[in-house]
Amino acid sequence: MKILKKINNPYLPAIIGTIALLILGQFLSAGFLSMNNISSILMTTSILTLASIGQAAVIISGDSGLDMSVGAIMSMTALFGPMINVGSGVLSFILMIPATLLMGAIVGAINGLGVQVLKVVPLVMTLIMSNVVNGFSIMVTKGQPSVMVGKELQGISKTLVGPFRILPTVVIVVLILLEVFFLRKSRYGRKLFLAGNNRNAANLCGINSKKVIVLAYIFGGAMAGFAGLMLVGYAGTAQMNMASSYTMLSIAAVVIGGTKLTGGKGTFIGGALGSLVLVLITNILQALNMAAGLRSLIQGIILIVILMMNSRAPKLRQ
């Protein structure tokens, strides 16, 4: 019992789910735990983790905050990021990172200002921006993206040691740094949790809640922008709306990881664990050779159940 108490309770469902899914996957497919498959799972998980980090910040900010533009931002930066070409392949890749972060941050800023200044409901505001971003991408590319993904960007898939590749390793480091120094140790992180828990109490403490929440949306947009660049680097090609599924997946990932949709509680590490659970589910469904439509149906049902359980949790506690 003492050991169980020391484990962070919000992580327990994701940890138990991960172990169970790994065992189930190996039972259903002999090669499920092979080095190549584990490496592929970690790659996909790392991209979803980047998206879930930004989504977690928005949800923690409270006021029913949800960023429904994550998939659109990722698709946009996946299209436009590789278009940056300044002659040197290495220099182009280096410039792609701040450029995609900026693109995502701009969309996030518009979302945040719309929610806090114009008082638009977060769900509605971010859905509107999702359509705007998708329309902008179609207008620029004329619906026919032709993107050459350089070898430097595709190099994120290179293997380092065992199943670990460059991208998952970088994401793990970024995740830990953001969790400790941005979410837990920084003054902004404490303000974010307080604003998410009780907006009025935060304002009475002298915290500018509007500014804190707008910054959360900016951060969420920037992380989605970076995730889109990593996605196209891994895929090696860009397509319209290639990241549309990441919106709901990012929400489900942070919920599985212990983030409350009511705000004021959550972690980035929990989002990473939730991402791993969702990727494992997808891989198991693929191992069963299910048709794409049936896989989408099952994934949708799982997401609905997860979100329903989370939304009922506060009422059950009361």
Image (cartoon, rainbow, N blue to C red):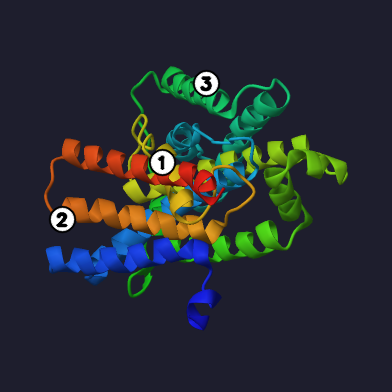
Q: In this view, does 141 lie above or below 197?
A: above
Q: Badge 1 is on which residue?
A: 308
Which is nearer the eye, 189 or 90?
A: 189
For numbered disc 1, what is the local secondary structure?
helix
The residues tagged by marks 3 and 2 sit, at their Cα atoms, a distance apart of 36 Å
Nearer-N-terminus badge (3/2):
3
Q: Look at the numbered disc 2 and give the secondary structure of its residue.
A: helix
Q: Nearer the viewer, residue 100 or 179?
A: 179
The answer to which of marks 1 and 2 sits earlier in the sequence is 2
Residue 245 can be seen, yes or no = yes
Q: Residues within 10 Å of mark 1 (few under 14, many from 20)?
A: few
Q: Of helix, strand and loop, which one carries label 3?
A: helix
Dot placed on the residue nearer the N-terminal end, 1 or 3: 3
Position above or below: 36 against 312: below
**Marks 1 and 2, how far apart at CA:** 27 Å
Few, some or many C-alpha atoms within 10 Å of disc 2 (few <14, some 14-19, many ≥20)?
Answer: some
Labels 1 and 2 touching (C-beta < 8 A): no
Q: Position of residue 168 (x, y in %)?
A: 43, 62
137 with respect to 240 (left or right) = right
Instruction: Check disc 2 and report the residue beneath it.
Output: 287
| Residue shown at the point (65%, 65%) measured from the top left | 180
Residue pointed to by mark 3: 128
Q: Which amino acid does label 3 sit on?
A: Ile
- Report x, y in % for residue 1: 48, 80
Q: How many marks?
A: 3
Q: Which image quadrant is residue 179 in?
A: bottom right
Res 112 → quadrant:
top right
Instruction: Name the spot of residue 50 as percent of width and height, x first.
Output: 49, 51
Question: What amino acid does circle 1 point to?
Answer: Met
Q: Depth-wise, is mark 1 or mark 3 nearer the camera?
A: 1
The residue lying at 41 percent from left, 23 percent from top is 141
Q: In this view, does 111 lie above or below 297?
A: above
